[in-house]
Amino acid sequence: MTKPYTERRSVPLTLLSAALVLFAGAAHAQSPARETRGNLVLEGIPPHSTRALETLDGWLAGRGASFQDFMPDGSILITTRFGDADQVHHVARPGAARTQLTFDIDPAGGASANSASESRVFLFARDRGGNENAQLYLQNLDTRQTTRLTDGRSRHGGALWSHDGRRVVFQSNARNGVNQDVYIAEIDGSGGPRLVVASQGQTWTPLDWSTDGQRLLLLDYSSVTDASLYVAEIATGGFTRVPLSGDPAKPSPQSGIGSARFSADGQGVWFTADLGGEFRQIRYVDLANGSLRTLTSELSWDVDDFEVSAEGRWLAYVANIDGFSELFIADLGAGVTVRSTGLPAGIISNLRFDRQGKTLGMSIESSQSPRDAWTYDVEKAAATRWTRSEMGLIDPTQLVAAEVFRYPTWDRIGRTPRQIPALIHKPAKSGRHPVVIDIHGGPEGQSRPGYSPFAQYLVNELGYAVIQPNVRGSTGYGRRFTMLDNGRLREDSVRDIGALLVWIAAQPDLDADRVVVMGGSYGGYMVLASLIAYGDRLKGGINVVGISNFVTFLTNTSGYRRDLRRVEYGDERDPSMRAFLRRISPLEKASMIRRPLLVVQGLNDPRVPASESEQLVAKIREQGGEVWYLAAKDEGHGFRKKTNRDFYLKTAVTFLERLAAP
């Protein structure tokens, strides 16, 4: 059978030559030269702008300090940075010099002191190049001798000292690389860590030791709204679920659980949970009869953190009130709770009582002050600042406070438009300002008024207004709000960005024609999805370690995380869900990303593998799009080392300068 005749038209030589030139240019744009600078890999990134080179370093030169723990003599351990990465330091008294204890190219964290009064030994954790396979180390503060407790290759965390200071319990996936089991190590070096509670599908995290050292309190975490508490017998490895219904005969409700501690007498457990309600409150369960009582029933916000003093008299807790922290001290014996006084407004974290149970340690930061270590005397209601972190060359009077606002989104609660909470940093100067929409990751996270010298730089030097929305799916605003983006509701959170663009267009001091989106991890997915859905209203985007294809992400993320992420995003093994996940994945619609894009990736990322960024970059370039690509060989899920982070931020400033042009 002959094929039908198709007329062929000749192409003028001049047009053909022009087409070849255009094709060559497009091919060059799709595959820019790859340049390696130390551990950094650059593709399509121009030289940094003069402004970035001349002005940004002064803003990034500062540091913060995070409280870690009390030493037995009342001095403290902190983490701070004097070189390229955070390390453990010792501070003998308030305002004293910070003495560095750990030295390495990779950050150290999670420092905790031995609870034995005569000990000068502390524990800390470190991974390699951001791979999150953290190892646990012991260091003697006097001799500086450092010993590794763990196997050097697996993932470890959640380390806790026993009350007698002779053992450490921690979680590890050493058995098979996937399941999180519970191990105990003797610190005298008598044998290696031994498996005490094996996972049977649970994702174990140790939360506390009983006073007699015979039992462990364990958390089995499935998702931010689904977790359970167990008491495990160390001698046998057996475990029993803690009843949380108030009646042992009734099943416990599905509940989001924050943390938990044994009571001082071991007869019950203090814990934070929503118990199927809206907010995580502090509750007490009697282990003998299952009865429940609530300490914070009047509080219509989440409790973020709490600690109980060793003798059981004091319980300190931090409430997350619209993103700001409030510290409360409960005298359990007297039945009285008071709000703390004398602490600066901001975000409070890392609560820890000293050995005497009278002084509480913590970290505090705000949008206008870097994180520092503080203590609070609960009997005297007196606050003491231990560190005063340097702010680099920043004039503190220039720093703008983050303001909370809400904007109406596309759906309604009854007859009222749903309101989305957000933070905004605005330049002091008048005029119409370009906007950066900075979207947090998680998605089970929350943008809060913490210290960001980069955000302050954008406001003060580039004239951007910085908006940080807490779209549906964020934590901090109730269980139902957190669940509004689960599974097939995923794109509803993207529509919240569309509603924010409408709000921006209605503001006389914001320029709706110069709006850029940026975000990391899940926030990176949101950046890509927003560029696809609202590209005509955006100037460009910055995607840091973002998800480009939910199916390949779930397939390639580390095995110990896969089931946890399936709860949030959906199970890609189900054909119907797989088709849905492919449909909403930015990679499937990469041709619709027509705005400039900066992609940033750690090549050791165990959460969002580098393949997520690289497949996206290749696809956009195939379509003729513009992508700047920056990767680091010694980073994981984000850039933690100062030299790498500074280079990324200078690249981001160069990118944003260009997009801010009218």
Image: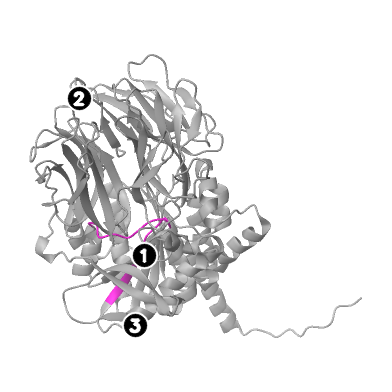
Residue 187: percent from the left, percent from the top?
33, 19
Q: Residue 305: in sight, yes or no?
A: yes
Residue position marked by numbered label 1 in the rendering: 470
Q: Is residue 153 above or below residue 563?
A: above
Q: Which mark is residue 141?
A: 2
Instruction: Confirm or deny contact between disc 1 and disc 3 (CB under 8 A).
Output: no
Coloration mode: one colour
Q: Is residue 443 magenta?
A: yes
Residue 26: percent from the left, percent from the top?
51, 70
- Specify start and end residues of the magenta stretch as a single range: 434-451
Sequence-wise, which precedes: disc 2 or disc 3? 2
Neighbours of disc 3 within 10 Å: few (<14), some (14-19), many (20+)? some
Task: Between residue 557 and residue 634, name the one nearer to us.
Answer: 557
Q: Amino acid at mark 3?
A: Ala
> Would residue 151 appear left or right of 350 to someone viewing this image?
right
Q: Amino acid at mark 2?
A: Leu
> Would residue 144 appear left or right of 494 to someone viewing this image?
left
Image quadrant in which you'd find residue 435: bottom left
Residue position marked by numbered label 3 in the rendering: 505
**What residue sits 52% from the left and 73% below the top?**
592
Residue 436: percent from the left, percent from the top?
32, 70
Q: Amino acid at mark 1?
A: Asn
Task: Between residue 424 and residue 74, name the one nearer to us.
Answer: 74
Q: Quadrant of the N terminus?
A: bottom right
